Amino acid sequence: MRRKVIAGNWKMNMLPNETLSFIEALAPHVKNSEVEVILCVPYTDLFYALLAAQETNIKIGAQNMHWEDSGAYTGEVSAKMLKSIGVEYVILGHSERRQYFAETDETVNKKVKKALEEGLKPIVCVGETLEQREAEKTDEVIGKQIEIGLGGLKETDFATLIIAYEPIWAIGTGKTATSEQANETIRAIRKKIVEMYGNEVASNVIIQYGGSVKSANAKELFTTSDIDGGLVGGASLKVEEFEKIINFS
Ligand code: 13P
């Protein structure tokens, strides 16, 4: 049985003092949750988030990293650096990084390998544009993202790695994929993983849905056959709303 994992992606939001009060307010509401709860926060909030999340069941992640350990890469942060302060998860290949910061499937692959090597758990994002969906290219586009982005890994890597299916047209638009659409695409992702790593890996890997998840649609999405929770943007910035999503059942 796969577990449910719900992660907040704060993107470029929240200051340290807001991080402290958010986690303090959220923790009691999720302490008995069977869902795994993760908050992926800006670099400047990581240390505060880790402090506030001590002795809670909230896990902390970053939103990006570089694939080198150190060196002349102004403005970058390495997996080793994240690991050294106790970060557990890292989002890789988010569509906003692909779109605005020239992230490619190849750089995603380097980052995934480095994260795993350092013991960080990657949340790897894939997803199609509206044009690609309308041209019925969704499976092909995502197939390529998976083939390259998740190429050359070990079967055991999939015990820690999470995939997030985030259709780009559903991110921040209020336009959610229907639970059927999301479930169907996630099944196609599992099929691709079967081809690459076999049945067992494919049926055990955690695959989340992301894109305008809110308390009003969480239950419908997360109770389908193949969706193992969500990667939540805007709705993870409000304690009350995020808590309802976590306690969807
Ligand atoms: P929204 O939930 O704001 O649509 O963002 C989704 C997302 O990009 C999470 O990574």
Image (tube, grey):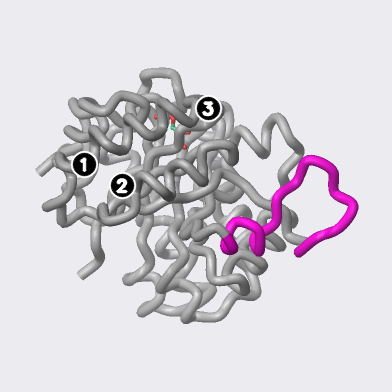
Helix, strand or loop at label 2? It is: strand
Front-most of 172 and 47? 47
According to the image, label 2 marks what residue?
Answer: 6
Residue at x-position 72% and y-position 44%? 103
Q: Nearer the viewer, mark 1 or mark 3?
A: 1
Mark 3 or mark 2, earlier in chain: 2
According to the image, label 3 marks what residue?
Answer: 130
Q: Nearer the viewer, mark 3 or mark 2?
A: 2
Specify few, some or many for label 2: CA neighbours under 10 Å numbering under 14, 14-19, or 20 or more: many
Q: Are marks 1 and 2 in contact (CB under 8 Å)?
A: yes
Q: For marks 1 and 2, give the CA distance.
A: 7 Å
Type of residue at label 1?
Ile
Would residue 102 be counted in the magenta stretch? no
Against 116, residue 137 (above or below) is above
Against 56, residue 133 (above or below) is above
Question: Is any atom of residue 26 visible in this view?
Answer: yes
